[in-house]
Image (cartoon, helix red, strand yellow):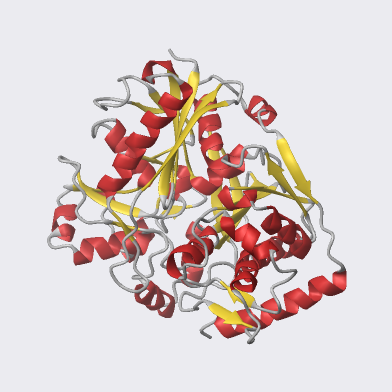
Amino acid sequence: MGKHLLAIDQGTTGSTALVVSLEGETLGKKTVEFPQHFPKPGWVEHEPADIWKSVEASVRGALEAARLDGKDIAAIGITNQRETTVVWDKKTGAPIARAIVWQCRRTASRCDELRAAGLADTVRAKTGLVIDAYFSGTKVEWLLDHVDGARARAEKGELAFGTIDSFLIYKLTSGAVHATDVTNASRTLLMDLSTAEWDDEMLTTLRVPRSVLPRIVSSAGVVAETRGVGFLPDGIPIAGIAGDQQAALFGQACFAEGDAKCTYGTGAFALVNIGAAPTWSDHGLVTTVAWRIGDKTTYALEGSSFIAGAAVQWLRDGLGLIKTAPEVEALARSVESSGGVVFVPALAGLGAPYWDQNARGTITGITRGTTAAHLARATLEGIAFGVWDLLEAMAKDAKRPLNTLKIDGGAAKNDLLAQFQADIAAVAAVRPVEVESTGRGAAMLAGVGAGLADQARAAEMIKVDRTFAPSMPAADREEHLTRWRDAIRRARST
């Protein structure tokens, strides 16, 4: 058996592979982007074949960077963009259509129907979620209804549904294993949160045949072994699986009740560990499984801001204000403030705590003196404001303020964003040396699942880079928040 861990972090815009030592050192890393498809306004799709090619290329690149090969890998951990939905042929493995991405809003009208039918409370009680096009259940229903012959084939047991973790497990085992872990299952609208089993009532409501569903497994433990994969040898155990945000929670060692983190990726996602029993939010958050190790399940409250790093990508690709994403910080720093400009980055609707799928991005406060730099600064501030909404909801549910916030993800490298987040949330933001907490969390889960590490050892792997202490005067903070609340009111559809 090898002595290193391989983490596959399959994200929204690219796949990253990390080779990590059992001591927690990252030995090799490779990220490979793949195309995004926007066939209609509000629709977002991926080609599953592109995802698989990016995974292969990233794994090859990470191993090359580490100067290792597949035989040096002791276990594999998988983490993934969560609600993105794939349906494929069980025999051939061929997808029946492009994957519907978590950001896609095509099932918004179906969600409106479900709410109008009075199902919101039932869905929340069973799944911990709200009815929203974000989650997988209405996506798989849409595919079965809109791809020719798909529903009939599903009823015959010919098709398989999965989130991206399931798809990768299937590919890594040459079709031998169809499974998903409990964290990903908890994002589908189809799983009973208390039992961690597929729920018959939700399957009936969303017309999803049980035959298409993967087996639900724990987040740590050997689920399968590689087989027939050209870029990895046979027999490597797949021993860790978790959705990206849960993996980041684990990767930041948020093991105690009340520990919280926020990951700044394509979107921004804040989670707080709530312990061994699920509780329901009164302030617009969802309840989700944080992880399950052995027979012990840990739960979390989560708030999702759908657009974070994607707003910076929009400045780059949509407006052409910057050539590369890292340039945004220097541009934003070239002015002392946003000049009163507020950007609500509701480019895919508003997630928690508003859950307004028809909200749209809004820019307020523009004057003749507004420049590209003001808009760049307002974009970074808008990301932080969206996270403030999530943290406020968490504090209200907990009936106490957060002590600290652990931050990670690519955009967490931005010092201006990190400091403004600490200032506007009035909480210290702690950034680790390695901000790839999703991939590291997957590696840590694989180490635990393969019996090579435990949670205490995993916590020792984390090194702090910098703590951003809040320093904004209270009056300035309240002035900022007043402008944000006004801009949110303008952005909302109701």
Image-based side of 385 in relation to 223, left or right: right
Residue 467: where, in percent of width, then height? 77, 46
Horizontal side of residue 239 vs 433, given as left or right: left
Total labels: the figure holds 0
- Residue 477 percent coordinates (x, y): 80, 71
Q: Nearer the viewer, residue 135 or 65?
A: 65
In the rendered image, the vertical position of residue 307 relative to residue 158, given as above or below: below
Give x and y (percent) for residue 57: 34, 35
Q: Is residue 207 visible?
A: no
Q: Is residue 226 above or below residue 184?
A: above
Q: Is residue 27 left or right of residue 217?
A: right
Residue at screen point 73% across, 65% down: 396
The quadrant where residue 399 appears: bottom right
Can I make out residue 192 in this image? yes
Q: Is residue 43 left or right of residue 324?
A: left
Which of the image's four quarters has the N terminus? Answer: top left
Residue 319 is situated, as x and y percent measured from the top left of the image, at 47, 71
- From this view, report whether residue 372 is shown above or below residue 221: below
